[in-house]
Amino acid sequence: MTSKLKTVAGRLRAVWMLLLVGVVLSVTSPVFLTPTNLLNVALATSVAALLAAGQTYVIILAEIDLSVGSALGFSAVVTALTLGTYGLVPALAAGLATGAAIGLINGLLVTRTRMPSFIATLATMSVFAGLTLHITSGNPIPVTDYDFQGIGQARFAGVPVPVWIMLVAFGVFGFVLARTRFGRYVYATGDNVEAARLSGIRVHRVKVLAFVISGVLASLAGFVITARLSTAQPTAGAGLELDAIAAVIIGGTSLAGGRGTLLGTLVGALVLGVIDNGMNLLDVSPFLQDVVKGLVILLAVFLDRNVDVLRRLVPRRAAQPPARTPELAQHI
Amino acid sequence: MHLQLADVRKSFGDNSVLRGVSFDVGPGEVVALVGENGAGKSTLTRVISGAHQPDSGRLLIDGTPTVLKDPQAAMAQGIEVIYQEFQQNLFPHLSVAENMYVLDRERVFGRLFVSKQRMAAEAGRALRRLGMEIDVHRQVGELSVAERQMLEIAKAMTHELRLIILDEPTAALDEQESEQLFAQVNRLREAGVSVIYISHRLDEVFALSDRVVVLRDGRVTLDAPTGQLTPAQVVTAMVGDAVDDFYPKERNAGDEVVLEVRGGNGARFHDIDLQVRAGEVVGIGGVVGCGRSDLLRALFGLQPLTGSVLVGGSAVRVASVEDAIGSRIAYLSPDRQAEGLCMGQSVEANVSLASLRAFSSGGGPLIGVVRRAKERAATGAVISDLRVRAASPSIAVSSLSGGNQQKALFAKWVMTRPRVLLMDEPTRGVDVGAKTEIYRIINQLTADGVAVLLVSSDLPELVAMSDRVVVMREGRFVAELTGDGLDEQSILKHALVGAA
């Protein structure tokens, strides 16, 4: 039960954080708890959340994908350019293919050249950010296709389409991670790549596929952001990789690999979204908003690592079951 | 040093690990500390080395009650521990000399700038004094396990050493290297250093120690001079009741040849011809590095192999792990931490990992939904069959004892229904009780007709559990021993000097 309790607790920690921030904002701002505002939060969260979903796969594998922001920008531009000439469906296909191709390149670099993913994706991040600027000469590309704009601006059953996209993506990829063989292989490979390989898992394929998923979700996020703005901004994705990684970490996924859930990541993304929203509502200087975000990340990781410390700080009520410490583990 | 422990107790939460431990270690005395995994040896080691504080009880050094508040305090008293995972205390990218003097608390080699020449010269002198031949300029990462261990001891002796704890020091050493270590321990004893020697190997305990202290469930169940004891008494004190059948070997060899290798060649083995019949255990003897482990890895697709391999009479490819598993070959790695288990995952996930395809719909290489109910039923059956003791199949496998982890590793491969099982050191780092259970698992497998290739540095185990032993030296089979000709001496003779 321990591991199950642990993952549930991991999720819960982010949930507690979300509730805490939510309660504080409900009290301080009359607007926060209105349906319109909450939908705004979800809408604003959707782009980073999509990136974070793919990032979760990569981080559970004990890798990292720094290129998601660039992949978003590049595929958004490819989509917008294709849209003008060939129409909606080819444009979507081209966008998704671009994201997949960037993921494939990342995956092959990491598995074939044995480059650390931090370095490989740092390089591709730079390459695709530069290519995007080069193709567009730095100018935004306007998008006038009405149907495409719907991806970002329409509503279905009163809920903005990007929120639906986010929910469906998390549903699908959450299921894949939790219930399919591929998902199991992701956890096993991230936990101990040698043991996974010796169990007959093609660990390179697992890693490549995870990077491809990350790239595809980046292009999906690119559709959303382009459709919302009715323009493909060459720099639309700049810095978003950090938001994505932050959401994953706040959601309880371990950078060491082998541990994490997509539900946790969704909550992590919402925590960031709510904080952004709250600071806007409370008129906090945008400069200070990044400071707060950084502190939240520290707090989340601190909570994750130091549950025992907190137990000691909080006065004990009833006897709690002892936390499983490494020392103890050796004797069970 | 004269170390006395008086009624030392230590609990973690509800789990009392030490329940009143008392014993003495005199100066120049080698005390063998034995006990099953979980008996409290590691915790006791940590208490003596200042890493843990006892909840109650006293620790006396030369008659003076002493509190070792941290490992630095213990080191200041001249107490050193060489842990089982000894590599952790060394820096692989630094040289031998730099590792030896990495602390250099007295700033002998300079305050701000360190003189590497003087350091190397001093390290060379120190190693020669100990009779060790290690190039002080080599990077530690390039050293063999045995050399690293010697280095650990040499490093401990760079400052005043009064008590040394050696935790399973021979776990990764071959016979020759172990002999060198024993010589080193004897030298320490002559120098008046107290030694606490932790080992699962009773032959070593009897060859080396002056006194044996047995721990069971956090209590001392035996404390007597080694000369007055028999191995049976020690084992009884460890496990509680008399174990008559330590090696419960069953002979299950049939007639059908299940595994055959013809003209097998690889990087470190040559001209291997081998047949293993259904239910037969063929042991491979030889020193570490003779090619025995390489042969197993090659048969599992982890190293290149030329020549032909036949399973059940038909030629198979073993170019990759997937090939090998597809040919129903399974491989039990000697290093379950690094290559065997995914420690952070659940027992169940580990056990089903190599056979997940059998429990999922959709036959693609990766995609396919895992049928949880089917998986739970199948893993549950094997877990109880192999007596893997886990509070629940969903707890992390890292929370199991070493023996139960090893059984979980067996369970993973039993799930793949292998025809051939390659085992490298199947009982390494496993306590006595679990060893017997693992031998029973081997019996179960052979009764089902599985062909077993067994590599083990534990010679009594190799002799007892094999139907037949082939001895390897420098990559070649040099002898085959069966029946009355199969004993430890013959294996050693062939392994070291070849057929005389």
Image (spheres, coloured by chain):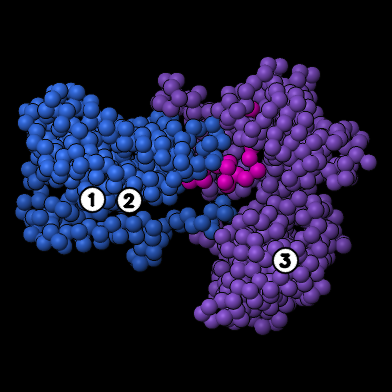
Chain colours: A blue, B purple
Residue B458 coordinates in the image, percent (x, y): 77, 46
Q: Which mark is residue B196?
A: 3
Q: Relative to B294, does residue A310 appear above or below in the rendering? A: below
Q: Nearer the viewer, mark 2 or mark 3?
A: 2
Q: Nearer the viewer, mark 3 or mark 1?
A: 1
Identity of the residue drawn at 19% across and 23% down:
A90
Q: Seen from this angle, which residue lies furthest top?
A: B314
Identity of the residue drawn at 38% across and 33% down:
A209
- For label 2, the SS is helix
The residue labelled by disc 1 is A239
Inspect the image, locate mark 3, and give the three-letter code of the amino acid beneath it. Ile
Q: How many marks?
A: 3
How far apart marks 2 and 1 lie (CA) works out to 16 Å
First in residue order: circle 2 vs circle 1: 1
- For label 3, the SS is strand
Q: Relative to B207, does residue B440 appear above or below in the rendering? A: above
Dot 3 falls on which chain?
B
**CB within 8 Å, label 2 to label 1:** no
Quadrant location of the N terminus of chain B? Answer: bottom right
Residue A222 visible, this orientation = no
Taking depth in this image into account, of B403 and B147 the one nearest to the observer is: B147
Q: Quadrant of residue A144?
A: top left
Inspect the image, locate mark 2, and give the three-letter code of the amino acid beneath it. Ile
The residue labelled by disc 2 is A249
Give the extent of the magenta segment: B329-346
